[in-house]
Image: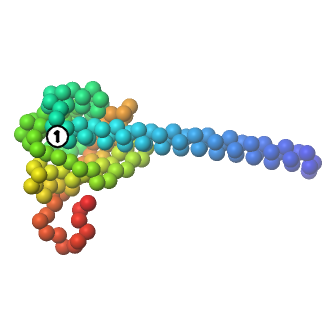
Amino acid sequence: MNVRYITVKYGLVGLLTTLALSVCHASNNQQNALEQSNLKKALYCMDILENRPDIEPSHRIDILRKECFAKLYIQHSPHVPDGRDAVLNLFAKRFKNTPEITTSVKRTASEGDLVWIHQHVKRTPEDLGRAVINIFRMQDGKFAEHWNLGQAVPEKSKNNNTMF
């Protein structure tokens, strides 16, 4: 083979490889930015939802409706009907019935359009509470789909690791 042909051939392969890697790197940066944006928005919405008794309940619901929950919200918890209005009605009642409820975030993660939030939820300051994991699928910066698991915090544990 001709040396010039081999040089051009490998030069083109190198150029195409560099371009492909650049596109992948840009795509990864965009994905990381989206994941961080989704996580930040999810934490903001959870704070409004769980920890802001200083905001009038009807105003909290307005914020949540406009900024946090997608119109076509899908619910996987068997205790709550599908839809944004159903979950907001549930929380409107909860704001009224359990005004002392608090949630502390213990850890978070995000991947693609999914956000995980591990929380300690307490109905009152004296309550041992529940360990809860919420998983949200985000769409356009809003909760579009939700799964969750919860477990009561026991008085005594068979290990010293805590649930958090």
Please name the residue shown 86% across and 48% down the image: 6
* In this rendering, position of residue 21 left or right of residue 127: right
* In this rendering, position of residue 136 left or right of residue 150: right
Residue 145 visible to an observer of this rendering? no
Relative vertical location of residue 29 with respect to residue 64 in this rendering, above or below? below
Please name the residue shown 18% across and 32% down the image: 55
Residue 50 versus residue 28: which sits nearer the camera?
50
Residue 39 versus residue 82: which sits nearer the camera?
39
Please name the residue shown 38% across and 31% down the image: 140
In this view, which residue lies farthest toward the front?
Answer: 54
Check the picture and name the quadrant holding the C terminus: bottom left
Disc tally is: 1
Q: Residue 94 at x, y = what percent?
A: 11, 39
Label 1 amino acid?
Val
Q: Secondary structure at mark 1?
A: loop
Q: Residue 10 at x, y = what percent?
A: 80, 48
Q: Quadrant of residue 150?
A: bottom left
Q: Quadrant of residue 113?
A: top left
Q: Around disc 1, counting alpha carbons within 10 Å, would you say few (fewer than 14), some (14 to 19), or many (20 or more)? A: few
In this view, which residue lies farthest toward the right?
Answer: 2
Residue 84 visible to an observer of this rendering? yes
Q: How is the image coloured?
A: rainbow
* In this rendering, position of residue 151 left or right of residue 6: left
Q: Residue 125 at x, y = what percent?
A: 11, 52
Q: Say which residue label 1 marks.
A: 80
